[in-house]
Image (tube, rainbow, N blue to C red):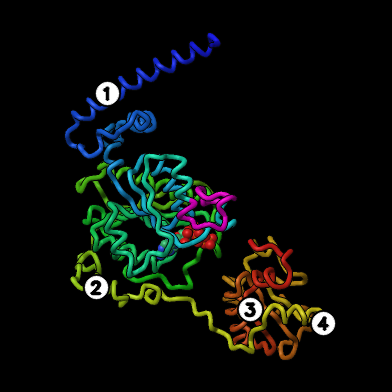
């Protein structure tokens, strides 16, 4: 045998012996920590090394805190912009069991911020994509996935299995559902949200004593005021930072850093523009008359389970049937019309930033909110000699929602007689008429 190979084999043997000795020492040490009998025997050398840099931080709480994390289970609702960074750090930190619930598939437009998903996982379930990433990152974590939406009839079964819930979703209806079910199941919620360049974080129902979402927001915001990332946009690292701060708070809760005495309800708000700013506001304690946590009615659980609380209806939906069929035109018909004569006006009501990304030829841009929505006249934007009583105007936006509201206003308030909304907006145009128009 080559002498260098012999040396190598001897060194490997030595290392194996050292490893066995270290393992025996670690087992002895862990057996003496009697308060955590469940996990000690299984705490491997890899885990000592993997988590060493966090265990030695005084505030963290050393090995007992690491063992608490290993004995903990969390449910992450939503594997999107907040869920991905939170999951990344929490799985790396060694949470024992992580449940992920999301019914959505990975889309290319998610990749700038949903950092567990990759170009290869576009089109597959976000849960599965996240599970694959976590398994590679930390094989000590048990991942359970639920490839469907959290809703009234499954929420109690799922939430009750975990110690803590992270609300990483993007709709008020789901926020209220997560809140109500978690309060009824006695679970602390770490709740985050973010849009454009800002985000917020709070801890709700802490130890089943802190205030809940309904203490702060007894009534939902008006549906018109709720903007999604797909409509309003979001800077990836901004939502990432929020997700990571959710992970930090989760670690503090699970390791027992916060106690009933030291925990003070708060809302922290981060803004990235124009200058970085993190403001932390003290919040009130539980509202004694809160509909959920202040006065737990026995029947609330049944009411949720039997779908008598319709969260979507409670939070309202934007009315999309604002136009009659003859006030709308589908994109195919509009394109045929353009080929015959292109004398009509095309009004694009998207924000100017979106207009700057892509636009249809010869369109005029008047942003719906706040300009067009409040305008008493839009005549200054139209070509000279345009006659409202007979000339045609077509209205377009990204998905065909704001364009309907603009069309309604033009007919009802601004005196236009011949105006039509382009059904499905630019997105539909790109799908049906011209695939070179980018969807974004
Ligand atoms: N009730 C629910 N149950 C499970 N997952 C949910 C529920 N409500 C929302 N989600 C998930 O929460 C995630 C929120 O992610 P994010 O806010 O980044 O938006 P998105 O839907 O992925 O992207 P975009 O708004 O750009 O289309 C989504 O993956 C969504 O499917």
Label 1 or label 3, whichever comes before in sequence order? 1
Q: In which quadrant is the C terminus drawn?
A: bottom right
* Mark 3, residue position: 423
Q: Name the residue rendered at 40%, 55% in the picture.
A: 145
Q: CA distance from mark 1 to mark 3?
A: 70 Å
Q: CA distance from mark 3 to mark 4?
A: 20 Å
Q: Is residue 116 magenta?
A: yes
CA neighbours of label 2 inside 10 A, class few (<14), some (14 to 19), many (20+): few
Viewer-closest of 10 and 167: 10
Q: Is residue 414 above or below residue 186?
A: below
* Mark 2, residue position: 302
* Mark 4, residue position: 341
Q: Name the residue rendered at 53%, 83% in the picture.
A: 321
Residue 334, position in %: x, y?
73, 80
Label 4 or label 2, whichever comes before in sequence order? 2
- Disc 2 on helix, strand or loop? helix
* Mark 1, residue position: 24
- Disc 4 on helix, strand or loop? loop
Q: In the image, 278: left or right of 211?
A: right
Label 2 or label 3, whichever comes before in sequence order? 2
Q: Name the residue rendered at 20%, 73% in the picture.
A: 299
């Amino acid at each position: 045998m080559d002498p260098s190979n012999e040396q190598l084999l001897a060194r490997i043997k030595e290392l194996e012996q050292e490893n066995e000795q270290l393992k025996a020492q670690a087992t002895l040490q862990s057996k003496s920590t009697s308060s955590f009998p469940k996990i000690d025997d299984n705490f491997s050398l890899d885990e000592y090394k993997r988590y060493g840099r966090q265990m030695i931080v005084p505030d963290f709480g050393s090995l007992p805190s690491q063992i608490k994390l290993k004995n903990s289970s969390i449910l992450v609702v939503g594997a999107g912009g907040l869920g991905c960074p939170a999951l990344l750090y929490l799985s790396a930190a060694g949470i024992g069991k992580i449940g992920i619930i999301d019914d959505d598939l990975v889309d290319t437009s998610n990749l700038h911020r949903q950092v567990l998903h990759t170009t290869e996982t576009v089109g597959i379930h976000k849960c599965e994509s996240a599970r694959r990433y976590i398994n590679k990152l930390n094989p000590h974590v048990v991942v359970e996935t639920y490839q469907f939406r959290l809703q009234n009839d499954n929420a109690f079964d799922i939430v009750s299995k975990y110690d803590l819930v992270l609300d990483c979703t993007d709709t008020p209806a789901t926020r209220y559902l997560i809140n109500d079910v978690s309060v009824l199941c006695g679970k602390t919620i770490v709740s985050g949200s973010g849009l454009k360049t800002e985000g917020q974080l709070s801890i709700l129902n802490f130890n089943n004593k802190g205030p809940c979402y309904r203490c702060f927001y007894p009534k939902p915001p008006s549906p018109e005021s709720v903007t999604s990332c797909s409509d309003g946009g979001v800077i990836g690292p901004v939502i990432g930072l929020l997700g990571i701060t959710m992970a930090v708070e989760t670690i503090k809760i699970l390791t027992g850093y916060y106690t009933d005495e030291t925990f003070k309800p708060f809302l922290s708000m981060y803004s990235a523009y124009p200058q970085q700013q993190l403001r932390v506001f003290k919040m009130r304690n539980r509202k004694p008359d809160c509909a959920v946590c202040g006065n737990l009615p026995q029947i609330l659980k049944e009411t949720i389970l039997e779908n008598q609380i319709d969260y979507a209806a409670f939070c309202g939906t934007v009315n999309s049937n604002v136009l009659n069929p003859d006030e709308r035109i589908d994109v195919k018909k509009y394109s045929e019309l353009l080929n015959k004569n292109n004398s009509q006006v095309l009004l694009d009501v998207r924000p100017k930033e979106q207009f700057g990304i892509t636009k249809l030829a010869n369109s005029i841009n008047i942003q719906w909110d706040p300009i067009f929505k409040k305008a008493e006249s839009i005549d200054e934007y139209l070509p000279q000699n345009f006659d409202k009583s007979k000339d045609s105007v077509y209205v377009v936006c990204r998905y065909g929602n704001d364009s309907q509201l603009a069309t309604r206003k033009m007919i009802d308030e601004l005196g236009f007689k011949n105006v039509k909304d382009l059904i499905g907006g630019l997105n539909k145009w790109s799908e049906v008429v011209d695939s070179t128009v980018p969807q974004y």
